Image (cartoon, helix red, strand yellow):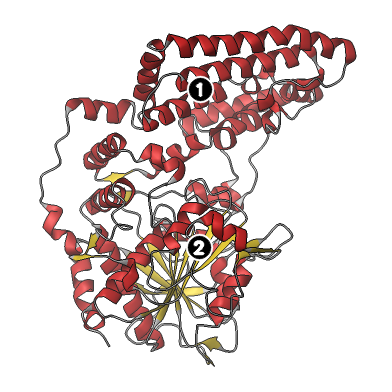
Amino acid sequence: MTDKTRNSGNREKTASAGTSGRSGKTAGAAKPKFPMKTRIAAELDPAGWLGSTAKAAVGAARNPVGVASAVENLATRLAKVPTDTARVALSGKNVEGAPELQGDRRFSDKAWRENPVYFSLVQSYFAARAFALDLVDASGADKITAAKARQFTELFWDAAAPTNTPVTNPKVLARAFETGGKSLVRGAGYAVSDLLKRKGRPLRVDNDAFTLGENMAATPGQVVFRNELIELIQYAPQTDEVHAVPMLASPPWINKYYIMDLGPGRSFLEWAVQHGRTVFVISYRNPDASMKSVTFDDYVELGIDAAVDAVQEITGAPTVDLVGLCLGGALASIAAALFAGRGDTRIGSLTLINTLLDYTDPGEMANMTDPDTLDKVEVLMVKKGYLPGADMATTFDLMRANDLIFGYWVSRWMLGEAPPAFDLLVWNEDSTRMPAAMHTKYLRDLYGANLLAQEKFEICGRPISLRDFTGDVYIVGAETDHIVPWESSYKGARLFGKDARYVLSNGGHIAGIVNPPGKKSWSKAVGAPEGEQAGALPATGAEWDGKATRRDRSWWEDWAKWGSARAGALQAPPSMGSETHPPLVAAPGTYVRS
């Protein structure tokens, strides 16, 4: 047993002293100083959208040629509206209009193409929207400023869409006539309730349809270890025999862990248990102001490190396979490399799902992690000791506002529809807070400076090189992931000391993990999962894509074969907990309810 294992009791003592761990060295540090301008902007414009849009407007005003081109395009498009509208009125048939109309689900009602009034309205709307975006393009602003200005402009025009008012939405008017106005009355009642109880955010899901431990986070198990940061859940075996190597799941702490155990038939952890694995998962405590000084080091030592110790003590296994998702995947990778650099061989294989390790191109998150925005985020965190989960959730909602905000304006407030029972949205509403010290380091060192990919990231007093970890690695990317673009997750696969197996899955950032076998599931990979990695990974994701084979199966199925081939011989399941780590409470535990 390693020195780190023998020292686990010291970590528990540190935890019970107030979850300071290694963070004691920063607990009394002076708060960072920021200019008054930054502190005011943090409250009024945390994402930098207003400031960037103002800069873009000034830049456009200094570019008369670009403005003239934008005006010309607007005039051309508006000039076509009367003649195209007349053709719709006379023929009653579809007329090719704005290219933006194609594929936009907001305007799927046939009235937008066949009714001359609605046709004219939507053509004028898209012409004006395009003009505003052309002005942003004419600003000559730097990449980040232009991207933020474009984001805000798109958000403004999405909010101003004619679908978002009852009078100019044919579907809403038709429903009102069908129900004798009852749909509008119901919608108005929902809107008032949401304004009073949810600060104007429309209720998107029927939360009463799901209960933790019953139809969500329902895989049977026990909490077998707890410190001030985590609870460790061990799932009960569901097969007569299990593989010798246990599995520890490392979820993201930006939401509750049960995205990995969403519900029966939709739980990746249940799938692993049913395929002969002894499965443990970390459930993080939801931080409050008392945890403001908890550091990234603590998440390694009180999280991954302590959990691996407990798993080994309960199972007697010399190695543990780590499976990480999103931020939890980054933490698992860092921990695995840290341990390997120390000569600690406790980690067997590593599986990463929708995880960024190389932050060169973080997708849409690049607009939220530039230096100016990181300063403002830190101002907000220093003030409260944490980043509120609601603030993070709102940011992500605004990045997909048509689907996550405005669509519910229509369905709930105008059509008067009751919210659906949808497990993914229930989980998404169950947001968590981010402790200030840890989240600052995570954002600045990884998103801000990309230190991990450069082998300059330090944790627990050591620089981290992912090449130090030479175990087998399995990495999953999702085709439509906007938080972790799959090409960026692919870059991470090339940072380890051994060639990884890379698999591309259907779905996005969340649906990528909730991916049970089904008619819509597919995955792409090179070679068979049971064998060795099929040669060195190509330099780019595009090159890999050209060699990969698409199969009509979920990545869960591919992973089960890959993991089983590396998880050791079959044997009788271990006990639930041990004398040292007895079961404390039934899964999903207590921290998940905080």
Is 93 displayed left or right of 454 in the figure? Answer: right
Q: Which residue is drawn at 38% across and 68% down?
A: 496
Seen at 76% across and 27% down, the residue is 109
Going from the N terminus, do you reach mark 2 or mark 1 first? 1
Q: Can residue 148 be seen in this view?
A: yes
Residue 187 position by quadrant: top right
Residue 43's x, y, as percent? 30, 29
Q: In this view, does 509 lie above or below 303?
A: above
Q: Amino acid type of disc 1?
A: Phe
Label 1 packing within 10 angstroms: few (<14), some (14-19), many (20+)? few
SS for tag 1? helix
The image position of residue 29, as x and y in percent, is 10, 49
Image position of 214 with respect to 340: above or below: above
Label 2 Cα neighbours within 10 Å, binned few <14 / some 14-19 / many ≥20: some
Between 493 and 102, which is closer to the camera in this rendering? 493
Assign a secondary structure to mark 2: loop
Residue indicated by mark 2? 538
Q: Is residue 243 above or below residue 539?
A: below
Q: What residue type is labelled 2?
A: Pro
Frontmost residue, 530 versus 395: 530
Residue 380 image position (x, y, % from top left): 27, 37
Q: Name the residue under label 1.
A: 156
Quadrant of the drawing holding the N terminus: bottom left
Residue 93 location in percent, x, y? 86, 20
Front-lying residue, 504 or 592: 504
